[in-house]
């Protein structure tokens, strides 16, 4: 009994911990001041506290706890009580005296019974272990749901940061074109340059304005997707904090096999699959327990009451008239009619309480139940549990295979992103220098506005490619860290 109570308290504490973590995340997320910029950690915490898939997984954990508690409570004896009250008339059977009488009868019955399972081929113990592993598996499924959400929010967050940087690049390009247009306009007015140069730069400014609008629209769309992931209304203001990212420090110093080896030990979906295999194995053992005899200890207590027993005859110690009948029972009223002195009287002194106390009947015994033929339901249950065990093993193999493929793909993507990022760095350096020289030539009148536009567009494209490669590499490297159990934070 102490072990059962202790297990119940532990399970209740685990359930409280699960929901306490979600409540803590809600409090932390709601603590973000209005108008403040959200960091990646704040976005993740808010998403974890409001995501429906995570809440559904948390309820699955709680349901598994209920199953586990119920399996442990099955060790306790059963105890049931019943009460009945009846009214009959005419010729009937008195439930107390078990004799036929022809009168109105009011009767009541109270009973209680209990049964304690002594042995059933360890079926209960196997069920408890089955639900213990199922509960552990559901907890890992909850962690998997959180991981999926974290990766999704991080990806959307990085996309917002990337689009913000593109907006800054487009705005810088527009400001540069506008500045150059102002200078060219003055030179055209002074007759130093032809009107065509001013028109070309004016068209370039218009093109840069369109580019800025497109980038601002892309940023607005990415912010909308982040709001949807966080379940925030689209009308609510939301801005993100650009983290201080240094891709140069993100070095990939592990091989894909080393990363997969760590991921196989840290990823919750792998552990969940293993727990489900163990749970299905114990389910097979529990199902086989129904094929064997079951021994139980049964006990009960019963008592009853009848209105026919309420009246008792009390003699008055006077002379009785030989063998002559004292009287008879009226068939309509059911009461005695005396023809001579009854030498006593009937009194209703044997009430409900006294009858319940005097009529107590107790039983105690052992019961051995041997399954012989029950429609092969037990054998069918065993076969189904074996099939489910094989399915659990296949699911585990699929999960490991998918994890390996994901790690290999993420590793190749990270290596490719690293190379692209390094190439983009060199490209931006070269384009920046070329544009600086072109500005000098254009200012000196040695280059046309068309050549200036080409150099500016090349620089902008190189900066855009660098931003894309930068954040793509950072996210791909963080995904590899995530597979190794490292927190995904900036």
Image: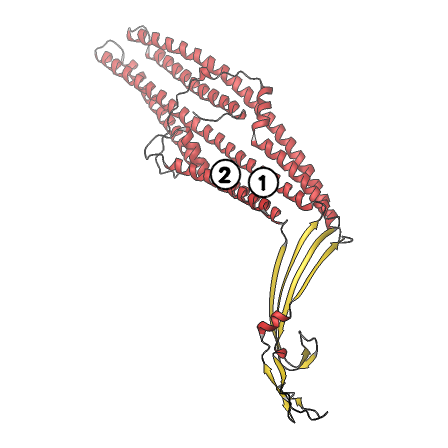
| Residue pointed to by mark 2 | 54
> How many tags in the picture?
2
Left or right: residue 185 compared with residue 249? left
Q: Position of residue 14 (x, y in %)?
A: 52, 40
Q: Is residue 141 above or below residue 486?
A: below
Q: Position of residue 216 (x, y in %)?
A: 36, 28
Is residue 354 positioned above or below 330 on the image? Answer: above
The answer to whether one can see residue 470 in this image is yes
Q: Nearer the viewer, residue 79 or 414?
A: 79
Q: Quadrant of residue 466?
A: top left
| Quadrant in which residue 179 is drawn | top left
Depth check: give the residue in front, 408 or 354. Answer: 354
Residue 171 percent location from the top left of the image: 33, 22
Q: Which residue is mark 1?
A: 135
Display coloring: secondary structure
Where the C terminus falls, by quadrant? top left
- Mark 1: few/some/many CA within 10 Å (<14, 14-19, 20+): many
């Amino acid at each position: 009994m102490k072990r059962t109570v202790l297990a119940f308290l532990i399970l209740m504490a685990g359930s409280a911990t699960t929901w306490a973590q979600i409540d803590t995340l809600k409090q932390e997320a709601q603590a973000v001041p209005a108008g403040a910029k959200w960091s990646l950690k704040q976005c993740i915490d808010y998403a974890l506290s409001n995501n429906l898939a995570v809440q559904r997984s948390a309820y699955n954990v709680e349901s598994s706890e209920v199953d586990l508690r119920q399996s442990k409570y099955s060790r306790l004896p059963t105890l049931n009580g019943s009460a009945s009250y009846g009214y009959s008339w005419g010729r009937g059977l008195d439930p107390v005296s078990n004799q036929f009488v022809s009168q109105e009868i009011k009767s009541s019955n109270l009973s209680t019974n209990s049964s304690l399972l002594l042995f059933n081929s360890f079926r209960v113990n196997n069920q408890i272990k089955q639900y213990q592993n199922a509960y552990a598996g559901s907890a890992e499924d909850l962690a998997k749901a959180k991981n999926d959400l974290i990766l999704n929010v991080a990806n959307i967050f990085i996309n917002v940061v990337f689009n913000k940087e593109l907006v800054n690049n487009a705005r810088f390009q527009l400001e540069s074109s506008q500045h150059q247009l102002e200078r060219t306009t003055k030179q055209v007015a002074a007759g130093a340059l032809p009107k065509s140069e001013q028109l070309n730069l004016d068209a370039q400014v218009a093109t840069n304005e369109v580019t800025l609008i497109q980038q601002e629209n892309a940023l607005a769309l990415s912010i909308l997707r982040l709001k949807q992931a966080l379940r925030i209304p689209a009308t609510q203001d939301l801005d993100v904090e650009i983290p201080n990212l240094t891709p140069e420090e993100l070095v990939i110093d592990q091989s894909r096999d080393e990363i997969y080896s760590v991921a196989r030990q840290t990823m919750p979906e792998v552990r969940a699959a293993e727990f489900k295999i163990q749970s299905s194995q114990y389910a097979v053992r529990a199902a086989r327990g129904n094929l064997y005899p079951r021994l139980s200890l049964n006990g009960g207590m019963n008592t009853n009451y009848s209105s026919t027993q309420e009246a008792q005859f009390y003699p008055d110690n006077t002379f009785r008239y030989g063998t002559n009948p004292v009287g008879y029972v009226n068939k309509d009223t059911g009461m005695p009619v005396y023809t001579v002195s009854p030498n006593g009287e009937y009194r209703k002194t044997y009430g409900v309480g006294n009858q319940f106390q005097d009529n107590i009947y107790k039983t105690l015994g052992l019961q051995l139940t041997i399954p012989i033929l029950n429609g092969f339901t037990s054998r069918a249950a065993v076969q189904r549990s074996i099939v489910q065990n094989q399915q659990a093993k296949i699911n585990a193999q699929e999960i490991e295979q998918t994890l390996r493929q994901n790690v290999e793909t993420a590793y190749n993507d990270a290596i490719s992103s690293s190379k692209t990022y390094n190439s983009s760095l060199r490209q931006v350096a070269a384009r920046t220098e070329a544009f600086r020289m072109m500005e000098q030539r254009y200012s000196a009148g040695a280059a046309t506005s068309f050549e200036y536009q080409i150099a500016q567009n090349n620089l902008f494209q190189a900066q855009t490619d660098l931003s894309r490669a930068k954040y793509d590499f950072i996210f791909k490297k963080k995904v590899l860290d995530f597979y190794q159990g490292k927190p995904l934070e900036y």
